[in-house]
Image (cartoon, rainbow, N blue to C red):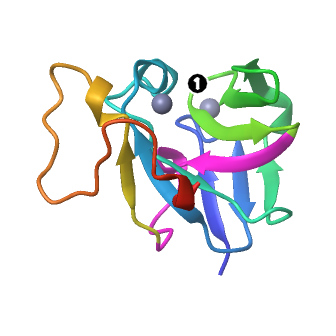
Amino acid sequence: MAITGECFCGAVRYQVAAPLRNARSCHCSRCRKAFSAQASAYAEVEPGSFSWLAGEELLTTFATHADFGLQFCGRCGSTLCGLYAGQVHGVTLGCVNGDPEVEIGQHIFVGSKASWEVMPQGVTAYEEGPPASSE
Ligand SMILES: [Zn+2]
Ligand SMILES: [Zn+2]
């Protein structure tokens, strides 16, 4: 069964035909701004498994880096996906509908988390980036 997701206003909808992978949460200052939250919550999609169902014309793209970008609903502002080299690289977990059957496996850049965030106990956390083997 395909995973589906949509923005806050519901105008932009997508589906992902393969399991999500490498779910993670980054607590750095840039991700806090990009996700308007204490951290990002993001998982990668299998190449070729992602497709837009509705509202693609409403998307606004913000290039964060030469090859990286984020795409938002231009109407309600939800951040829906990350781009790499012009292709959808992953989705924001907050916009996924229901249970995507993936859990955040890594909390990264916890060393630069917001002063007001209290980290839950027992999660896998790294002061900076993830260990080289997992990226
Ligand atoms: Zn929207
Ligand atoms: Zn980050």
Residue 66 showing in the rendered view? yes
Q: Is residue 12 above or below residue 17?
A: above
Within the magenta stretch, is there residue 98? yes
Q: Nearer the viewer, residue 134 or 99?
A: 134
Q: Residue at x 65, y 81 (%)?
A: 1
User: Residue at the location (70% across, 21% down)?
Assistant: 74
Q: Residue furthest bottom?
A: 1
The residue lying toward the viewer, choosing from 12 and 69, is 69
Numbered-mark total: 1
Q: Quadrant of residue 71?
A: top right
In the displayed structure, 1 sits above or below 133; it is: below
Label 1: element kind: loop
Question: Ligand 1 closer than 8 Å to the CB at disc 1?
Answer: yes
Question: Closest to the observer: 109 or 102?
Answer: 109
Crowd band around label 1 with a 10 angstrom C-alpha radius: few (<14), some (14–19), many (20+):
some
How far across and down, in percent of the image, does residue 114 sit?
A: 25, 21
Q: Which residues lie in the magenta part?
A: 87-101
Quadrant position of the C terminus in the picture: bottom right
Position of residue 77 measured from the top left corner of the image (x, y, whole percent): 58, 23
